[in-house]
Amino acid sequence: MMAKGIGARPAAPRRWTGTFAGLSLLCLAVQAVQKADLSGDPTVATINHSLSLLQRLQELLHDGNASDTTLRVRTTGSDEIKVFQAHQLMLSLQSEIFESLLHNQTMLTLHEPPDSAALFEKFIRYLYCGEISILLHQAIPLHRLASKYRVHSLQRGVAEYMKNRLASESNQGHVVGWYHYAVRIGDEALQESCLQFLAWNLSAVMSSAEWASVSVDLLLLLLERSDLVLQSELELYTGVEDWVATHQPDDSVVEKMLRSLRYPMISPNHLFHLQKQSPVMVKHYSVVHDLLFQAFQFHSASPIHFAKYFDVNCSMFLPRNYLSTSWGSQWVINNPARDDRSTSFQTQLGPSNHDSAKRVTWNVLFSPRWLPVSLRPVYSDSVSGAIQSIRIEDGRPRLVITPATTSSDFAGVSFQKTILVGVRQQGKVFVKHAYSFHQSTDEVADFLVHADLQKRTSEYLIDNSLHLHIIIKPVYHSLIKVKK
Ligand SMILES: *[C@@H]1O[C@H](CO)[C@@H](O)[C@H](O)[C@H]1NC(C)=O
Ligand SMILES: *[C@@H]1O[C@H](CO)[C@@H](O)[C@H](O)[C@H]1NC(C)=O
Ligand SMILES: *[C@@H]1O[C@H](CO)[C@@H](O)[C@H](O)[C@H]1NC(C)=O
Ligand SMILES: *[C@@H]1O[C@H](CO)[C@@H](O)[C@H](O)[C@H]1NC(C)=O
Ligand SMILES: *[C@@H]1O[C@H](CO)[C@@H](O)[C@H](O)[C@H]1NC(C)=O
């Protein structure tokens, strides 16, 4: 400890104190200086046996040599007991809980649920050699052990593993389970990652077995969000209906859920069908009839006219990220770093049935390396090869969306655009980013800022193509403040 302290400041001359202690300290200081001086010497070599040391430490646990601690791990709900001959020093080194438990005793009996008990040997082994392998279904029990015994490095490692494996394939799905676990232990970062993954990947989740394991609280949280990525509001209605049929929750819960759906985003003929045919709707009609009535009214007038009589400043009239073609279009750009590209597509003017026949054509321009005018190099014949501090390579990706025609029909309506960027993770495409703006991605500071489109290895390129999905959301801006 002391040698290290002195070695850290070799330049400071130490005064000779005339005692033995002072002498030995001085010697250590001199050694430290010599070592530092010699570091450029070609004769220096490092003898590195760290791997075999780790091997010996593992044998120590395996053989139980010189053990001073016995751990008896009892599986709750069974008679099974696993016994480990361990070492107080090794256990205490990384776990303050073991340190205090072993303070005055040499034999501990620990009670663990079956999934944690099954992993206990791996867990103890990690304490001896700092290495562990994890599978999806082991993440929760392992994180639980790391949290219980306060092994912070392992806790962080498992949480990181979970964040990186949200998109992994699993038979039953795991993200919903991880979300519920994160809520139980109060890990807000993991909670947020899981929630965002579920919100941006909702169609897949709703059609999987995992959907049935969603809790009331999670479903209500999801229904509040405007950033859900799914085919249509009708798809969400069907998902909620299935969930309710499986769980048969209290009426108050069903009513809350039904009131969180955005009926004006569903076409009137579908609404009429729901009103008459959906068992959940028929049963709870009395608590949503005001919303349905309002939605039918919304469909029968122009939104601007409607807004004169009704408050449209609420989430009910705010579209989510709908993938169906009336709301936008997918755009796959091959070799996106090469040059500027453009495309065009049509959307509905708005969700109101009043406008159902009206279409808007949108032109989209994508530039891989765009520079604002003020930063563009000035080319002049007289000063050829002038030093350009800013090169065209310094430009940033930019995407601009403009209507092909301006029409008086747009009066009062502004269109919010959302770009979803898909990436491939573990062989599947899923939404990595969602950017929202009004006309140009200049309005958002971070559009594809870390995408590295020039590099073939960029994680944003799927078979050398950039996968975008553009969604156009009409916002009645005279009355609605858009949430950023
Ligand atoms: C010693 O060897 C191990 C494994 O070969 C390696 O991971 C570690 O970085 C090495 N340490 C040094 C100081 O070179
Ligand atoms: C543990 O003890 C056994 C025999 O008692 C011995 O063979 C083995 O080498 C020892 N292991 C270590 C790591 O000292
Ligand atoms: C160890 O100390 C704790 C309190 O510090 C006490 O509760 C416990 O009974 C002690 N155990 C033994 C075996 O002495
Ligand atoms: C979303 O996650 C599921 C598994 O939970 C997966 O099947 C799907 O491919 C993912 N991505 C998308 C875009 O749906
Ligand atoms: C719309 O509602 C939000 C909160 O729900 C409020 O902050 C905002 O002022 C409202 N805007 C108008 C124009 O009423």
Image: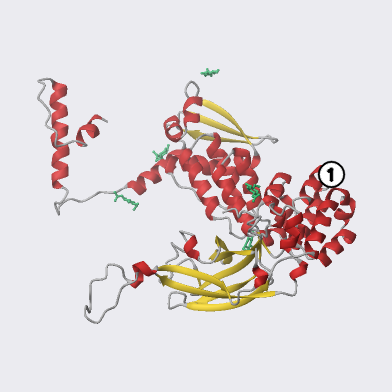
Q: In this view, does 159 lie above or below 301?
A: above
- x, y percent for residue 413: 65, 64
Ligand 4 position by quadrant: bottom right
- x, y percent for residue 237: 77, 58
Q: In which quarter of the image is residue 354?
A: bottom right
Q: Which residue is drawn at 72% across and 65% down?
A: 351
How many marks on residues?
A: 1
Element type at mark 1: helix
Q: Quadrant of the C terminus?
A: bottom right
Residue 118 visible here: no
In this picture, residue 303 sits left or right of residue 9: right
- x, y percent for residue 332: 55, 75
Q: Quadrant of residue 20?
A: top left
| Amino acid type, callout 1 | Asp
Report which residue position mark 1 lands on: 251
Q: Which residue lies furthest to the bottom in this view?
A: 381
Q: Which residue is drawn at 24% across and 29% down?
A: 2
Q: Which residue is drawn at 16% across and 33% down?
A: 29
Q: Which of 117 and 64 is in front in this view?
A: 117
Q: Residue at x 71, y 62 (%)?
A: 304
- x, y percent for residue 130: 43, 44
Q: In this view, does 101 lie above or below 449?
A: above
Q: In which quarter of the image is the N terminus?
A: top left
Q: Does the residue labelled 1 lie within 8 Å of ligand 5?
A: no
In this picture, residue 247 sits left or right of residue 392: right
Q: Nearer the viewer, residue 353 or 29?
A: 353
Q: In which quarter of the image is residue 426?
A: bottom right
Task: Bin the neighbour count of mark 1 within 10 Å (Cα to Cα): few under 14, some 14-19, many 20 and up.
Answer: few
